[in-house]
Amino acid sequence: MGLSVSVQREYLGAAAGQLPPDQCLPELWIEHNDDHSRALRLLGALQRPPQRQWHCRCGEFVEGGFEQCWNCGAPMPGL
Ligand SMILES: [Zn+2]
């Protein structure tokens, strides 16, 4: 593809837990100007990620795409 970008902060918001939404959006750090249009499309896709939410056996509600409970470390059911 030749698309050379790196995704930053994708999981920072969920990890920090308390950040306001405008600081939780994914960012693309573009290294080559030619990739700008493709990067914009990719960024748009990242802003509409498939949300996975599940209830852990310990009772915590896990969201943000995590496959492991942040509270007790149990894996997401079905993996
Ligand atoms: Zn748990």
Image (spheres, rainbow, N blue to C red):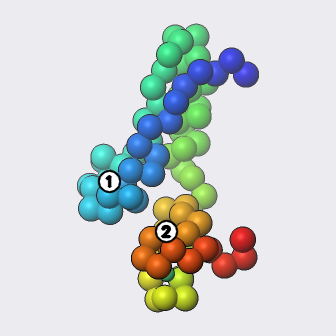
The quarter of the picture where residue 78 lies is bottom right
Q: Which mark is residue 64?
A: none
The answer to whether residue 48 is above or below residue 62 is above
Residue 56 drawn at (x, y percent): 53, 83
Report the front residue among 2 and 72: 72
Report the front residue among 39 and 72: 72
Give SS at disc 2: loop
Identify residue for label 1.
Answer: 21
Q: Is residue 37 visible?
A: no
Q: Quarter of the image containing the C terminus?
A: bottom right
Residue 19 drawn at (x, y percent): 27, 56
Q: Is 53 situated left or right of 59 in this image?
A: right
Q: Is 13 situated left or right of 53 in this image?
A: left
The residue sitting at 59% across, 34% down in the picture is 42
The residue sitting at 46% across, 89% down in the picture is 59
Residue 17 drawn at (x, y percent): 32, 63
Q: Amino acid at mark 2?
A: Glu
Q: Residues within 10 Å of mark 2 (few under 14, many from 20)?
A: some
Residue 28 drawn at (x, y percent): 47, 30
Q: Which mark is residue 63?
A: 2
Total marks placed: 2
Q: Is residue 29 visible?
A: yes
How far apart, in angstroms, are the residues tagged by discs 2 and 1?
Answer: 15 Å
Q: Is 17 situated left or right of 75 in this image?
A: left
The answer to whether residue 44 is above or below residue 3 is below
Closer to the N terminus: mark 2 or mark 1?
1
The residue sitting at 41% across, 43% down in the picture is 9
